[in-house]
Amino acid sequence: MVEQIKAAAGSLSWLQGRQKRSLEEVILILLCMVSIASVLPFALFRLWEGSWLSAGVDLSLVVAFIAVIVHVLRTGRHRVAGLLVTLFYSAGMLATVYLRGVAMVYWVYPTTIAAYFILRPRMALAINAVAMAALVLILSRQLATLNLLTIVVTLGLVNLFAYIFADRTGLQTRALHTEVERDFLTGVLNRRALDRKLGDYADERRPHLDTCLLLLDIDHFKSINDEYGHAVGDAVLVRLCTVLRQHTRASDRIFRYGGEEFAIIASGAELEAAERLAENLRMAVSLAQLLEQRPVTVSIGVALMDKRSSPKDWLEQADQMLYRAKEDGRNTVRVAPPKGIA
């Protein structure tokens, strides 16, 4: 048992690889591997006994699963691949029952449950409902009404329980992610969420619009804490985030990077647009009354999230520009030139 666990862990590490594959990709690839290991022996046995049509169905499924694995490993696009795998499962199950008879109906149950591991609950339920209707048509001439009704009721219960479990698990997972990746004081996303978002952007293989990273820091924030206390400093941070939300787009993401420093991912914004956004934010903060006793300003560094670079490079570039903005007198914006431009 220990050796099996180690082997599974090793396979998981290998699948994740250097590209840090998503959990959805890993699950889909593992399900395809398990399916190949389960179906291939039956295909070979049916070839040996001369059941050419059944063997052809099984071998077609094996080839399809191999194609899905190669596709996901090369492109990382798991959503359409997951839908195809579920359709392969359902079609193969129906073809097997049609060709081999009611004895093959046991394959229906793992096929039904597998759909909820691959697809969203509603999509899995819809596909399983169509498959079950087709199964009833196939079995209606082979089984007595009571036996057929037993299969329908048990399949319905399996679908119901699997749907409820998948739906509630999804809700709990999303709630947990939201809680873990939310800054408790300001309500914006935290450093953990920023690291994940930057990593997702770096791993994304599809073409996309230019996106920029802004690093924003409150000028002389330490003196605010020293003079007025940390409670007042916390109130300034909360008010600042309110201003940032009011002057960014719905597609932009705000993160508390650490202390009084914040990050903004400006999706679909080229450098010029990101610079205008940064200037608008700088001006909005300077005009807002974040602290009654004294004005509060921010310095901002801007960098293009060039896919030829890494998240570490983006953060370093934006941080360098933020440092330059501080050196140049604060309450200002500095933009990193695109890569290859001095």
Image (spheres, rainbow, N blue to C red):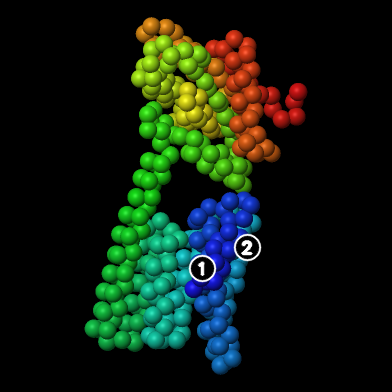
- Name of the residue lying farthest toward the bottom: 49
Q: How many marks?
A: 2
Packing grade of label 1 (10 A; few <14, some 14-19, many >=20) is few
> Is 41 on the left-hand or right-hand side of 89?
right
SS type, badge 1: helix
Residue type for callout 2: Val
Q: Where residue 83 sits in the image (x, y, percent)? A: 48, 61
Q: Quadrant of the C terminus?
A: top right
Name above or below for residue 278 compared with residue 311: above
Indicate which label's residue lies in the foreground, 2 or 1: 1
SS type, badge 2: helix
Packing grade of label 2 (10 A; few <14, some 14-19, many >=20) is few
- Name of the residue lying farthest toward the left: 146
* Image point (60%, 16%), residue name: 325
* Image point (41%, 11%), residue name: 227
- Name of the residue lying farthest toward the front: 226
The one of 41 and 173 positioned closer to us in this rendering: 173
> Is 133 on the left-hand or right-hand side of 94?
left
Name above or below for residue 273 compared with residue 311: above
Q: Where residue 238 sits in the image (x, y, percent)? A: 38, 23
Q: Which residue is mark 1?
A: 5
Q: Which residue is mark 2?
A: 70
Q: Where residue 56 sits in the image (x, y, percent)? A: 57, 81
The one of 74 and 141 positioned closer to us in this rendering: 74
The mark that comes first in sequence, 2 or 1, is 1
* Image point (55%, 26%), residue name: 214
Q: Where residue 280 sits in the image (x, y, percent)? A: 50, 16
**Can residue 198 be seen?**
yes
